[in-house]
Image (cartoon, coloured by chain):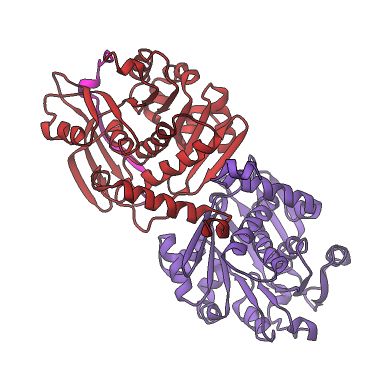
Chain colours: A red, B purple
Amino acid sequence: MSIVAVGAVAYDTIETPHGTVSGALGGSLSYFALGARFFGPVSIVAAVGEDFREEDRQLFVDRGIDTRALVPRPGKTFHWHGRYHEDMNIRDSVATELGVFGDFMPELLPDQRRADFVFLANISPQLQEHVLSQVFSPRIVAADTIKFWIENDLAGFVRLMPRIDILTVNDEEARLLTGEHNLVRAGRAILKMGARIALIKRGEYGVLQFSPDSMFAVPAWPLEEVVDPTGAGDAFAAGVMGWLVRSGGMNESILRTAVIYGSVMGSFVVERFSIERLLALTWEDIERRYRAFIELTDSHYSRWMSQ
Amino acid sequence: MSIVAVGAVAYDTIETPHGTVSGALGGSLSYFALGARFFGPVSIVAAVGEDFREEDRQLFVDRGIDTRALVPRPGKTFHWHGRYHEDMNIRDSVATELGVFGDFMPELLPDQRRADFVFLANISPQLQEHVLSQVFSPRIVAADTIKFWIENDLAGFVRLMPRIDILTVNDEEARLLTGEHNLVRAGRAILKMGARIALIKRGEYGVLQFSPDSMFAVPAWPLEEVVDPTGAGDAFAAGVMGWLVRSGGMNESILRTAVIYGSVMGSFVVERFSIERLLALTWEDIERRYRAFIELTDSHYSRWMSQ
């Protein structure tokens, strides 16, 4: 089983209180793929411009990521410039230049159309829908979006929602999408809009998971230092989808474990700038922090200790 | 085993976006005692003024709370006037009139001096120390404080810390007390200051527990509506100390369960104004929400379901 994912591959300029990087490989899909590849095969769908560096394609290839549908096109690679405030929960998008994504409507390869797991990383709802429509009968579809698309193509995203099994949004996006300030109500409203599961990301405060007859709340891994929050949400989705792929399906128990793997992946990404931490990561690192995460959150501590 | 607790018994004026109450029985000790009494015997130490209503003393007595050391004194009962913002995480103290607490230095009764469990609810560090010094050999001492005392008698509170087993403070207070913005560092700094365990309360985001070789993170019970946040921290302490009294001691496992009972008690208090929800509460309500809380936070969901 494998994941087909669509989203942005970008060159980022990122400013945080810890420094600035520019020309850094980024975009929602890069973070997702570099995280999810630890769990299972990932095939990515995106456009890149003439300025896209061969070494960056190789970086994906070297990690087993299928780049056959990483399409070179005339023009420039997606560029994002973000600036985080002293309180890194707040950021400004200084620039967002879609570049070659402006009218990108790719055709999936025959084997990609048979994918069981589909992840629609943050990109225009139109492109997300275009990709999803080509997959014959996906078992699990997860999607992310951002404030920009909720404000600029709400209709497009709302149309997509009944086809989404798992929606991952942050608290601000959940409120904007549903019009509900309270997150319990926002989570339930997302289910009414058609998604089967809502995962509301609260940054340093963790995640709330809503399914039709259950709620799961998990804190975030407590970090002493956050260097760059970029990509945390995409790496979270990578851990979630990754664990579902590994498990070959989804039930409440698998989903809760998946949310913890997602939280673990998100906690790594923010430790360094851009995708640096993902590149240095090993499966052993992931497993070690997963076990520490269980120890951190398990209310049946003695039971856990004796296992 | 029983708890001796010192703190404020007050008449409150509380303004929240949901309305205003005035002349409401409140104060840190009232919330604590009305919560902890569900778990075991509670004996309270406080001063009240000539305006203190007999019915309010009776309200404690009717619930099995020992009021022999609730001392009537000439003057007025402690008065607090709080105003919550639209974002109820923020509040202003419009007025704080200590009244009869100005120079209250009580003598504990002989049986109170033999207490195993001592809770020092928010009141001046001097009074907290005065009470603690009279207890012969307490097994567990927990204490709370607020920004006001950290700013006005830091030395007094710091002197107390090596005698505290469990310090409960909110995130803002933890930062102010330690000078560390990051809560992981703040938690560790509290342990270095002498407390054995630090419980950092994060309101709607839950609690972080720090012990010398372990950390425990728990989310808050997700509420659809918060009517009045007053007393949530004191009710939290009530659940924590209450469960420790019930368990007759403390280890990591008991403490984690205690923190969940604390979170449960805190979640009830904020559902209505003042102490109203505590007065209407039953042990069955507490147990039901405790079980729901475990279901909400347990990462081993299927294991839990099959028990």
Q: Which quadrant would residue A104 be assigned to in this image? A: top left
With A139 as the anchor, is A192 left or right in this view? right
Question: Considering depth in this image, is B2 or A60 the residue closer to the camera?
Answer: A60
A121 in relation to B68, above or below: above
Asked if residue B169 can be seen in this view, the reply is yes
Q: How many marks?
A: 0
With B280 as the anchor, is B250 left or right in this view? left
Magenta segment includes A38 = no
Asked if residue B271 can be seen in this view, the reply is no
Question: Considering depth in this image, is A50 or A60 the residue closer to the camera?
Answer: A60
With B154 as the anchor, is B131 left or right in this view? right
Q: Which quadrant would residue B188 be assigned to in this image? A: bottom left
A295 in relation to A14, above or below: below
* Residue depicted at x 38% and y 49%: A287
With B99 as the anchor, is A138 left or right in this view? left
Q: Residue furthest front?
A: A307
x and y, in percent, of residue B42 in the image: 77, 70
x and y, in percent, of residue B24 in the image: 76, 58
Magenta segment includes A96 = yes
Where the N terminus of chain A falls, by quadrant? top left
Magenta region: A87-108
x and y, in percent, of residue A113 in the image: 33, 15
Question: Considering depth in this image, is A299 or A221 the residue closer to the camera?
Answer: A299
A298 in relation to A278, above or below: below
* Residue depicted at x 82% and y 73%: B67
x and y, in percent, of residue B149 in the image: 56, 72
